[in-house]
Image (cartoon, rainbow, N blue to C red):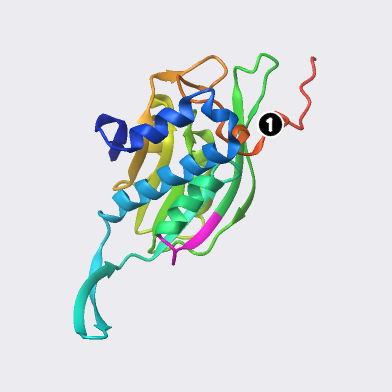
């Protein structure tokens, strides 16, 4: 299984990553969301180079020309809510793609906030049978929510190819997602950081993407009580 780490090469992507990691830059929510979207656009462009193409004859005002166009039948799926700006970036490139949405989120299951569980409560997806499935989620920390999303989406058919795309990943999460993916899948990361802290946040990372995009949330509606 191939894992692509864009931080291993120099590109303008480094500028966007530097900005979204910066605490001062993060104070402007609109600019933060825009950079997440731009990273999605650039990653989608790079991913498009790996797809199958077929020629199409296009008639211009002065003649005809054969242009290779993407042959793949694409579904872009995201994990709510943090994935929405990232998903928008992919959709602006793959503008004819169908879309899927999974509500899978992690929840602390102890009082110390050191152990997490994953809850999936909603999925809206077309059939992915025989199609190219691109699952986009900006944060790949424990890998639990992405693994749950993969499992849910695979119930809608067996894709021809799965691409998992994230802005930032922890090595531990990558291993969890690898185990959930079929052979021949690809994981795309703008950066792979050193690991996670005791609260399961990526270090050095950039914080909680959903909160930085949309505002803080309650950590859980489920109360944890002592026995």
The quarter of the image holding the C terminus is: top right
Q: Determine if the magenta segment contains residue 98.
A: yes
Rendered residue at 38%/64% (across/down):
130
Range of the magenta residues? 94-100
Report crowding for label 1: few under 14, some 14 to 19, many 20 or more residues within 10 A (C-alpha).
Answer: few
Residue 180 seen in the figure? no
Query: Where residue 13 sits in the image (x, y, percent)?
Result: 34, 37
Rendered residue at 29%/49% (across/down):
46
The quarter of the image holding the N terminus is: top left
Rendered residue at 52%/34% (across/down):
144
Query: Where residue 147 sits in the image (x, y, percent)?
Result: 49, 40
**Left or right: 48 in relation to 201:** left
The image shows residue 61, relative to residue 101, as above or below, that is: below
**Left or right: 111 in relation to 102:** right
Q: Quadrant of residue 5?
A: top left
Q: Determine if the magenta segment contains residue 134.
A: no
The image shows residue 56, relative to residue 146, as above or below, that is: below
Query: Where residue 189 sits in the image (x, y, percent)?
Result: 36, 37
**Left or right: 225 in relation to 129:** right
Residue 122 seen in the figure? yes
Residue farthest to the front, as pictured: 62
Of 18 and 6, nearer the camera is: 18
Of 61 and 202, nearer the camera is: 61
Rendered residue at 25%/33% (across/down):
10
State the SS at label 1: loop
Q: Mark 1 points at which residue?
A: 216
Q: In which quarter of the image is residue 54?
A: bottom left
Query: Where residue 190 sits in the image (x, y, percent)?
Result: 36, 36
Numbered-mark total: 1
């Amino acid at each position: 299984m191939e894992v692509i780490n864009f931080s291993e090469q120099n590109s303008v992507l480094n500028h966007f990553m530097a900005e979204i990691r910066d605490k001062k830059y993060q104070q402007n929510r609109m600019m933060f969301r825009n950079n997440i979207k731009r990273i999605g656009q650039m990653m989608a462009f790079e991913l498009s180079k790996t797809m199958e193409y077929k020629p199409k004859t296009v008639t211009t005002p002065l003649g005809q020309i054969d242009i290779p166009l993407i042959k793949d039948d694409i579904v872009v799926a995201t994990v709510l809510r943090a994935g929405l700006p990232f998903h928008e970036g992919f959709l602006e490139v793959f503008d004819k793609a169908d879309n899927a949405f999974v509500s899978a989120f992690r929840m602390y299951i102890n009082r110390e906030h050191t152990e997490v569980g994953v809850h999936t409560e909603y999925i809206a997806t077309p059939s992915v049978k025989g199609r190219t499935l691109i699952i986009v989620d900006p944060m790949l920390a424990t890998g639990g929510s992405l693994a749950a999303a993969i499992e849910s989406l695979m119930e809608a058919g067996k894709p021809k190819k799965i691409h998992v795309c994230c802005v930032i990943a922890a090595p531990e999460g990558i291993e969890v997602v690898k185990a959930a993916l079929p052979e021949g899948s690809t994981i795309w990361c703008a950066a792979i950081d050193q690991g996670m802290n005791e609260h399961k946040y990526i270090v050095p990372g950039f914080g909680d993407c959903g909160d930085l995009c949309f505002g803080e949330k309650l950590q859980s509606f489920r109360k944890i009580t002592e026995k």
